[in-house]
Amino acid sequence: MADSLEKAVIPLLEAGWEQGWLAIRQTMQFDEAGLPDEIKARLRSLEKRTKPKTLVGRVKAIVLNGHAAGVDYADGEDVSIGDERAERVARELGESVAVDAEALATLLPLVVSNNQGRQWMFGSGLATGTSSIDGCWAALVPVDALLEWCEEGGPERWAHVAPLLPAFAPGGDEAGLRWSEAVLILLERAPRPIDVAASLVDLIRPMSWNGSRAEAIKQRLPLLDALASMLGPEHAEHIAAWRSQIAKTIEREARRELEEHRANNERFE
């Protein structure tokens, strides 16, 4: 088995073989314990040789491989820890791609067309790493071209692209956040705007903030009102469900912050 695998792999190494690397990793994760020591050693050597070396190759393997691949980026860890690590690496890769125009131009069509992967964390890293999200998109993929690409494919493309766009209009303070023009156009033209809205609603609950997270979320509630206005009364049930979920988050965060405040006070008493 090892002889045949090595013969098949060696010609592919120079061009990169992300799927083969993942397949080897999967074999190591699930079958290595029952393999002879010699085969284990050869398999580990082969894994090191096939491991993606370039930024584009690492994104293909880690961001675009899908969660059904059965193996994540971490070595010797259980599935949940490995998945957490892979999510973190996906974000770091997004930050790296944000400052590499050539890599971004190569990867963007793959990122938006792939249906199962870690695009959300990759997009989050992309947003963090670039100095100008709007400029990044304007220079490489004009919104009109992106919309045309969505229209040429299935309806799922619209929701898949939404988290990768600049979500908020530039300028203004935290209390004045509003959806960006690109997001509004996407909602207006999507065949199923409710799917696009569902991919955006999590942004109302920020993952980074100053001061109270509960207050930060409250300040973003007008964003949900804007979605409700665009979607219309036929989607009132979805809006109500999202509003209820967000309200629970605000309540939970406010309770957590109060408990932390009390604990801090007790330590100083």
Image (cartoon, grey):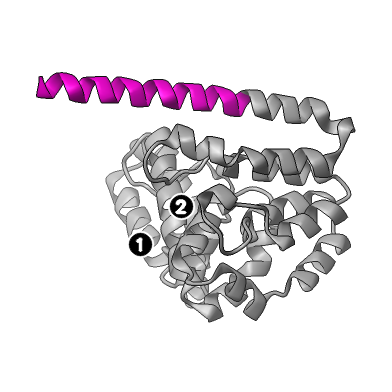
> If you read the primary sequence from the N terminus, does the residue marked by circle 1 or circle 2 appear first?
2
230 is higher (above) or lower (below) than 157 = above
> Residue, x 66% and y 76% (percent of image)?
138
Main secondary structure of the magenta stretch: helix
Q: In 3D space, how far apart are the residues under numbered discs 1 and 2 (Cα atoms)?
A: 10 Å
Q: Is residue 268 magenta?
A: yes
The residue pinned by badge 2 equals 24
Disc 2 marks a residue whose amino acid type is Ile
> Camera-side residue: 205 or 128?
205
Range drawn in magenta = 245-269
The residue pinned by badge 1 equals 48
Q: Percent position (x, y) of residue 36?
A: 32, 43
SS assignment at label 1? helix
Q: Percent position (x, y) of residue 167?
A: 63, 56
201 is higher (above) or lower (below) than 125 = above
Kindly indicate the quadrant of the structure image that contains residue 258: top left
